[in-house]
Amino acid sequence: MKNISIKKIVVYGVELILNEPYRLSGGRLVDEKIDSTIVSIETSEGITGWGEGCPWGTRYLPAFAGGLRAGLVELAPVLLGKNPLQLDKINQLMDFTLAGHWYIKSALDMACWDLLGKYAQQPLYTLLGGLFGEHIIFQSAIYTGSADEMVAQVQLARKRGYTHFSAKIGGDVHQDIERVRALYATLKPGEHIIFDANRSWLPGQAIQVMNALTDINCYFEQPCETLEECYTVRRFTKHPIILDESILQFQDLLWAQHKGLVQGIGLKIGRVGGLTKARRMRDFCVATGIRMNIEETGGSQIANAANIHLAISTPQEYRHATIDFVPLHNTITATDHHKFKARTVIPSDDYGLGISPLMQTLGDPIAIYD
Ligand code: MG
């Protein structure tokens, strides 16, 4: 057997300055810049794989850039000398070394997948299951505002080519009912909208809003903070429910599926610990009929590439839309040959993730392990 081993791991920090402040549901949790971490893993044969981890600020998830980099201090030395192509073994070793903290492992796992693609001389979508459908569709986030303001945002996003929208609601029950009605009424044929509360409702508020809108045919996303609260909402409402922030590990998904709580998930690669774990959840969702928005928690072209490959290798009837974070900040950390057209994308056939890093953007390393 060919003896391939990890010789060097290099860590870079990149600040992504947002074009406009990003507001989670109800206008809370406003971020103006996002800290992203990029890693390279170099093998004994001089081949380099790339990965990115971007937990999107400090308050969206139980995850943050400083924690990610501190975790790499624990994990990176342990991976030196190991075979990066044996993905499940690499992940088992990371889980034995550092319990939980899924988001810390994603960038390392991603770089190993990039290497696997380069060694196999295949694009990642082939290794993840194959090319399903002609392209994947990007959705536009619609920030919380008055009903009129949110309708105006949809009109602007439509002009920019979007047909899929994720409207962030929450904050006031009566305003939310008004927002949903106004936004739903503004949709044109072929357009889709999801109403994402980003866990801002108490169960009673979610039940009030959703039961006032039984004539509106739509999905509601992450109504409340915890799985148990969302389960209460499930029992007293009829709309299909998407879980996003609540799904941190496979067991969360298993519980939610078993309870009949979940009809869709936001499958964010960084949040669940990387492509290896996300692929496992993706396959479970396909096996049990759960629809997915396959996404990243944030980042630039490197994280986006992983997202694109995982999404396109998922049967299209099981995936809805994904997010392109690059237009939110315009920072270019890598070039690629993916074909972007009218808010859709087809991944390139280049090996691995199909990206080439721009070293002038990455700057000097913040840590080197060798
Ligand atoms: Mg969401």
Image (spheres, grey):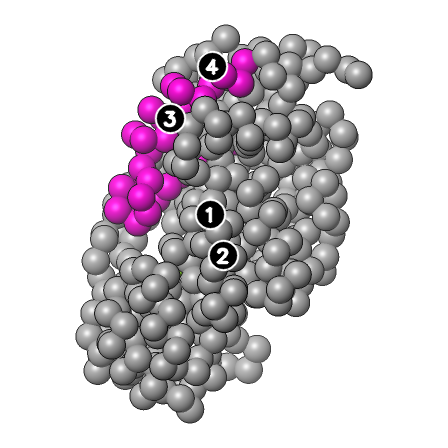
Which residue is found at the position 70% from the left and 32% from the top?
117
Label 3 Cα neighbours within 10 Å, binned few <14 / some 14-19 / many ≥20: some
Which residue is found at the position 66% from the left and 27% from the top?
86
Q: Amino acid at mark 1?
A: Gln
Between residue 254 and residue 351, name the one nearer to us.
254
In the rendered image, the vertical position of residue 116 relative to residue 276, given as above or below: above
Q: Is the CB of the residue bearing disc 3 within 8 angstroms of ligand 1?
A: no
Q: Position of residue 41 (x, y in %)?
A: 55, 20
Distance, label 3 to label 1, CA atoms, is 18 Å
Report if residue 66 lies within the magenta region. yes
What residue range appears in magenta? 51-80
Q: Position of residue 125 (x, y in %)?
A: 69, 45
Q: Position of residue 327 (x, y in %)?
A: 43, 49
* Residue 71 badge: 3
Between residue 187 and residue 158, name the one nearer to us.
187
The answer to whether any part of residue 114 appears in the image is no
Q: Is residue 287 left or right of residue 53?
A: right
Quadrant of the rendered structure where residue 145 is? bottom left
**Given contact means CB atoms under 8 Å apart, are the residues at marks 4 and 3 in contact?**
no
Quadrant of the rendered structure where residue 123 is? top right
Q: Which residue is mark 2?
A: 253
Q: Which residue is mark 4?
A: 77
Mark positioned earlier in the residue sequence (4 or 3): 3
Mark positioned earlier in the residue sequence (1 or 4): 4
